[in-house]
Image (cartoon, rainbow, N blue to C red):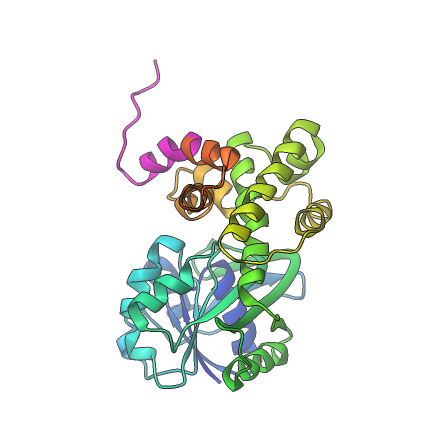
Amino acid sequence: MRIAVFGAGGAGGYFGARLARAGEEVVWIARGQHLDALRTRGLRVESIDGDFTLGPVEASDDPGQFRPVDAVLLGVKAWQVTDAARAMRPLIAEETCVVPLQNGVEASDELRAVLGDRPVLGAVAKVFSFLVGPGHLRRPGGPATVVLGELDNRPSDRVRRLAECLRGAGLDAEIPADIKVALWEKFLFVASGGGLGAVTRAPIGIVRSVPATRALLEAAMEEIRAVALARGVGLPDDVVSRTMAFVDTLPAAGTASLQRDLAAGRPSELEWWSGAVARFGAEAGVATPIHAFVYRSMLPTELRARGRLTFPPEA
């Protein structure tokens, strides 16, 4: 397949690198020093499954430099999705599918608002991978899975083809019975764990082991389940207990991208995680006090990172 990786960060970069290594035709949309590194040195991947280096690779900051592709793996941050959708139009042909890898549950709708319904799939990225520096990715462990499907859950050749392509690259690919349930199951995990990690400034091993924060984590997940049900997404009765059991298997030092971004003073996906839970809850008449607290507590830090708020100097 011919695949474009639009946003070659942790998720998009890792999946794209594995596909390219397996012999698929991959082009890269990136920017800044990362783009320069991809063009000149290639992409170095450190992974629990084995280290490798690609490249130099075919990369540009202008999607118009490339002809249309079979699939676009969209790896930009949540607040960049709409702009990316406008920019990727030269990559879209009749059967192209766009695969949003963002954490959250709004990316597909944002893409459809720009590109129309036809190209857009639902997708969930399950991978712990991050940029160490320009042209350098690290995946220390955990799953490497893409869950994908048509948004109306109908079987389709393009989904089957892409899943087979991912499996051929040694990745796990799943086609669930209901892609929206899969999206919200991951959202329940990342928004709750990432939000409480940001507020407590503690890794997951601490959050899950201190009884008070463990109770908060479980209650935050229950809020998301209630919101999902109110929006017609049939999360199963045991989703919270299963997710808590999964949390107990994670490396104790683990942190979410939201938590790391806020701690480093970078813009984060706060608006699309706990902010979205609070917003959806208000629309549906469902109380979400924990996520509302997380959102409001971290909002000053978020606004400072975006240059919209200045903190006074310390005394």
Residue closer to the observer: 258 or 229: 229
Inspect this view and state whether residue 30 appears. no
- Name of the residue lying farthest toward the top: 315
Residue drawn at x 51%, y 50% as measured from the top left: 230
Q: Quadrant of residue 18?
A: bottom right
Which quarter of the image is occupied by the C terminus?
top left
Q: Quadrant of residue 184?
A: bottom right
Residue drawn at x 62%, y 61% as measured from the top left: 47
Q: Quadrant of residue 271?
A: top left
Count of numbered circles on the image: 0
Q: Position of residue 5 (x, y in %)?
A: 43, 71
Inspect this view and state whether residue 218 appears. yes
Residue drawn at x 48%, y 44% as measured from the top left: 258
Q: Is residue 147 left or right of residue 231?
A: right
Q: Position of residue 95 (x, y in %)?
A: 41, 85
Q: Position of residue 194 (x, y in %)?
A: 54, 42
Residue closer to the observer: 221 or 249: 221
Q: Is residue 143 left or right of residue 136?
A: right
Query: Residue 310 lies in magenta, yes or no?
Result: yes
Residue closer to the observer: 285 or 81: 285
Query: Residue 312 lies in magenta, yes or no?
Result: yes
* Residue span colored magenta: 297-315
Residue drawn at x 60%, y 43% as measured from the top left: 221
Q: Is residue 254 left or right of residue 91?
A: right
Q: Is residue 141 above or below residue 261?
A: below
